[in-house]
Image (cartoon, rainbow, N blue to C red):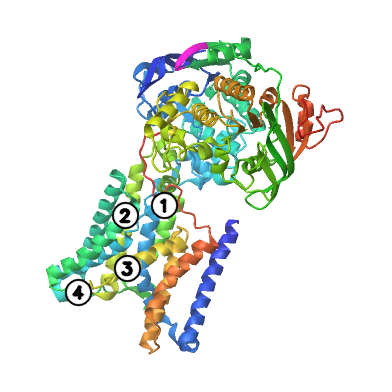
């Protein structure tokens, strides 16, 4: 199958899935008529906000996995950074934290996520732990640690609400015409996606990431340190997940919710399905994240309008999609050496 | 001319083995040097020392007159030594140009971006200079193995190499590509590049090299000028004794039919018919050879006979018993041994040691097993016996199959199968990828089986092999045995025609394929 064919196949699959969803919704609530009312500027804004954690997790996952380290702990990194952002901002300013304090919380969250990713990298690269097990550990540790720390700080698994980051507004210079008005993490995401694409496809570093995940020995024998490349890949997954988790907590919710699956609620996992759907391309991964987020937003909106669509049903759509894509469309090409340890000098 | 590479007294030991024993090697600048030797003679080890992958236990490395110590390949590359391994070090998903400049990418915008246009220009220029035809924009996964090899060579040159080491460069190439590669050697040598290539094929060394160094058991046993040596001299240096290029073979004394195949039809995994009604009777005390270009149904035929592939129709009989529907295990119990063509996939479990590998196929039968538990002491004795008798190196039943060279792996598989005391032996490419000394040894063992009155079916794409060993020779073309000939009387030309599906007019055919007298 040529690449053009498979690309077309990918979109056909996406359309089929969408069609299936619409039909399902129609059966459930006869919503086709109200769809038109729903999709407006506010809806789009909500979708973009919901895309933030998914897309950032996906970007991070791409860098890690392309370098050869499968990071399935993205969900855990989102939890850690969401918690850290609220905890730091809350400790600094309490319920009425200033914007500066929120931004300090934001920065701390990214740092916490990077440190957590570093731990994961050391375990996987230095001590050659199984990447899947180590990734699960990251998630499970975060899932237990964040609510526990919440209880220590606030006496319950949920934090009290604090403020959210003020929107940034993009105006046409010297006029009052607003081009785009959104929360800062949305801006960061819209910048990060093309930057990530550029870094992977147009820089020498991007070639090294690719080589490190495909044939690390080839990279090693030309004198590039595979370990460094892989560390960088994993740390970038921590960095992006940090932006995603902090963006979720400070950009939208303004609170840490630690009950059950926490406020992150599987978005890290959906991030993984998004980059698989996007075949490790940041643009494709963003598109998939946007698609999944729009379903989520649709479901929320329908609830608000009084249509009782089971949210669990909407919730499984990303996973069903990724199974459909992986099984029937093919051509999601996993990096050949992803998951393999590499030791320089071994024959 | 100056000396490009001088290795002096290189010694490299591995646990239990001396891979290189005080090896001296001198290579002139601008020359092509062949490193010739049997499998396991220490050729690759020596070159890995020169390339910095191994540190020698003794001896010195000099490149262009300077004494050097290489701790990593990086050090060797910096000194202008490049190596092209048997398994290419290329990234499939990148383009040829991206692979060639990997690690040394030209940059633009203050290093922020890779200058792809510059990279592609560089690669084109480099290619033109040495007469290579490489499309810089093609992805590695889309180009042939021959082109991939050129990309490897260009990568080394781009990295500044003027000494190029190639490990068995012809193993993966078609005959045409081999010729092209040797042309490339000449171009490179004309540009004062120094080429060292590893091979175990005499002919290649004589065709392509200016000088040939022969390694045997880790020692340099002689460096000769390619222009004034002979195949016999080289072969003798390699194995250390006169090679019997003709196997001694007394006339066959065929007995009853031991293996009978009738009207066999077999399809491949895709459901395409690959064997279309084959009839063969092989008698006891006879070697029946099957020649043909690979892929004309030989694998499927062998699969159906040995029980690894179910035939669509037809029967297989051993000593008159119908075994068509029997499993592989039941066939082994009926006295059928099998030397598979792919020893690493089918013959051995690579991360088992030789004790375990020696047990394969007999793990459920006495004396190795009482049906449930395995007698490891007995198994160890058995493995040791095979190792001794077939001169498998290293002489260690606890060595993992993976750690053996290809030739030694093959000797072990052959030894294990022949040690079953079989009635019928099916040997598929028994000497593929095996060095001269081991080939001769395996041939002798096959003739021993014949002397002992066993039934042998030999499938090989090497004409000299099937011609020498067989008493009758069937030629397969597109799933059929087009003719059965007398190997002593048929000429290479006639065989060539038969293998192309044409029946020459006066072929010394043995019309009655079923049990014909040789």
* Chain letter behind tag 1: A
Compared to A255, does B406 lie above or below? above
Q: Earlier in the sequence, mark 3 or mark 2?
A: 2
Mark 3 against mark 2, which lies toward the viewer?
Answer: 2
Q: Position of residue B231 (x, y in %)?
A: 62, 14
Q: Which region of the structure is painted magenta?
A: B217-222
Image quarter in which the C terminus of chain B is found:
top right
Residue on which disc 3 sits: A185
Q: Residues within 10 Å of mark 3 (few under 14, many from 20)?
A: many
Residue on which disc 2 sits: A133
Residue on which disc 1 sits: A66
Compared to B22, does B86 lie above or below? below
In the displayed structure, does residue B425 sit left or right of residue B100?
right
Measured in 3D between alpha carbons, the distance from the residue under mark 1 to the one under mark 2, in whole angstroms, is 18 Å
Q: Residues within 10 Å of mark 1 (few under 14, many from 20)?
A: many
Q: Of helix, strand and loop, which one carries label 3?
A: helix
């Amino acid at each position: 199958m040529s690449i053009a064919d498979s690309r077309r196949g990918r979109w056909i699959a996406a359309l089929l899935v969408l069609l299936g969803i619409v039909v399902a919704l129609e059966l459930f609530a006869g919503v086709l008529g109200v769809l038109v009312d729903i999709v407006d500027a506010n809806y789009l804004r909500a979708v973009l906000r919901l895309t933030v954690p998914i897309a950032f997790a996906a970007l991070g996952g791409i860098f890690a996995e392309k370098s050869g380290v499968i990071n399935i702990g993205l969900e855990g990194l989102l939890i850690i950074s969401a918690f850290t952002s609220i905890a730091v901002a809350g400790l600094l300013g309490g319920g009425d934290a200033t914007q500066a304090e929120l931004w300090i919380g934001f920065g701390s969250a990214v740092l916490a996520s990077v440190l957590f990713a570093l731990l994961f990298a050391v375990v996987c690269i230095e001590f050659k732990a199984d990447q899947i097990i180590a990734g699960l550990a990251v998630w499970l540790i975060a899932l237990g640690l964040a609510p526990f720390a919440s209880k220590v700080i606030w006496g319950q698994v949920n934090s009290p609400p604090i403020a959210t980051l003020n929107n940034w507004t993009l105006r046409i210079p010297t006029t009052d015409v607003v081009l785009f008005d959104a929360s800062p993490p949305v801006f960061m995401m819209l910048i990060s996606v093309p930057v990530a694409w550029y870094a992977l496809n147009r820089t020498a570093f991007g070639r090294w990431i690719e080589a490190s995940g495909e044939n690390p020995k080839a990279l090693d024998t030309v004198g590039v340190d595979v370990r460094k490349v892989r560390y960088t890949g994993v740390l970038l997954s921590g960095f992006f997940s940090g932006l995603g988790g902090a963006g979720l907590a400070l950009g939208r919710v303004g609170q840490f919710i630690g009950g059950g699956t926490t406020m992150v609620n599987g978005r890290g996992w959906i991030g993984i399905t998004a980059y698989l759907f996007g075949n490790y391309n940041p643009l494709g991964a963003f598109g998939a994240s946007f698609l999944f987020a729009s379903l989520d937003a649709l479901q929320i909106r329908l609830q608000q309008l009084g249509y009782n669509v089971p949210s669990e049903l909407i919730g499984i759509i990303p996973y069903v999609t990724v199974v459909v894509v992986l099984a029937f469309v093919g051509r999601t090409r996993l990096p050949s050496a992803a998951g393999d340890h590499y030791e320089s000098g071994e024959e | 001319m100056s000396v490009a590479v001088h290795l002096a007294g290189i010694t490299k030991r591995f646990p239990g083995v001396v891979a290189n024993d005080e090896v001296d090697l001198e290579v002139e600048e601008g020359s092509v040097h062949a490193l010739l030797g049997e499998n396991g003679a220490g050729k690759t080890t020596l070159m890995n020392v020169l390339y910095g992958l191994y540190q020698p236990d003794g001896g010195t490395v000099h490149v262009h007159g300077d004494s050097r110590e290489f701790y990593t390949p990086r050090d060797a590359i910096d000194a202008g030594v490049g190596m092209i391994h048997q398994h290419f070090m290329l990234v499939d998903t990148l383009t040829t140009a991206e692979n060639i400049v990997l690690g040394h990418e030209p940059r633009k915008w203050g290093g922020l971006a890779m200058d792809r246009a510059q990279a592609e220009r560089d690669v084109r220029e480099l290619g033109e200079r040495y007469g290579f035809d490489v499309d810089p924009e093609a992805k590695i996964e889309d180009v042939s193995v021959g082109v991939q090899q050129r990309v490897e060579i260009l990568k080394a040159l781009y990295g500044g190499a003027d000494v190029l080491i190639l490990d068995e460069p012809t193993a993966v190439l078609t005959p045409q590509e081999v010729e092209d590669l040797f042309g490339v050697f000449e171009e490179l040598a004309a540009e004062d590049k120094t080429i060292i290539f590893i091979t175990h094929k005499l002919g290649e060394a004589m065709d392509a090299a200016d000088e040939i160094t022969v390694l045997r058991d880790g020692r340099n046993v002689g460096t000769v000028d390619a222009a004034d040596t002979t195949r016999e001299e080289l072969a003798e240096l390699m194995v250390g004794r006169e090679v019997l290029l003709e196997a001694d073979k007394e006339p066959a004394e065929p007995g009853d039919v031991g293996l009978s195949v009738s009207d066999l039809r077999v399809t491949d995994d895709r459901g395409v018919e690959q064997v279309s009604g084959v009839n063969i009777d092989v008698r006891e005390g006879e070697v029946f050879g099957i020649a043909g270009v690979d892929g004309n149904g030989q694998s499927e035929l062998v699969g159906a006979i040995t029980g690894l592939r179910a035939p669509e129709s037809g029967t297989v009989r051993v000593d008159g018993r119908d075994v068509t529907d029997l499993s592989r295990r039941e066939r082994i119990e009926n006295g059928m041994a099998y030397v598979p063509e792919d020893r690493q996939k089918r013959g051995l479990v690579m991360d088992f040691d030789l004790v375990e590998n020696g047990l394969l196929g007999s793990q459920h039968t006495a004396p190795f097993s009482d049906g449930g538990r395995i007698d490891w002491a007995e198994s160890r004795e058995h493995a040791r016996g095979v190792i001794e008798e077939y001169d498998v190196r290293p002489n260690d039943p606890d060595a993992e199959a993976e750690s053996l060279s290809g030739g030694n792996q093959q000797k072990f598989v052959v030894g294990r199968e022949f040690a079953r005391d079989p009635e019928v032996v099916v040997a598929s490419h028994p000497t593929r990828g095996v060095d001269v000394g081991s080939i001769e040894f395996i041939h002798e063992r096959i003739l021993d089986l014949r002397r002992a009155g066993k039934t042998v079916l030999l499938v090989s794409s090497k004409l000299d092999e099937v011609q020498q060993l067989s008493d009758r020779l069937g030629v397969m073309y597109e799933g059929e045995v087009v003719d059965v000939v007398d190997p002593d009387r048929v000429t290479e030309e006639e065989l060539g025609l038969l293998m192309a599906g044409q029946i020459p007019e006066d072929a010394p055919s043995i019309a009655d394929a079923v049990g014909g007298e040789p």
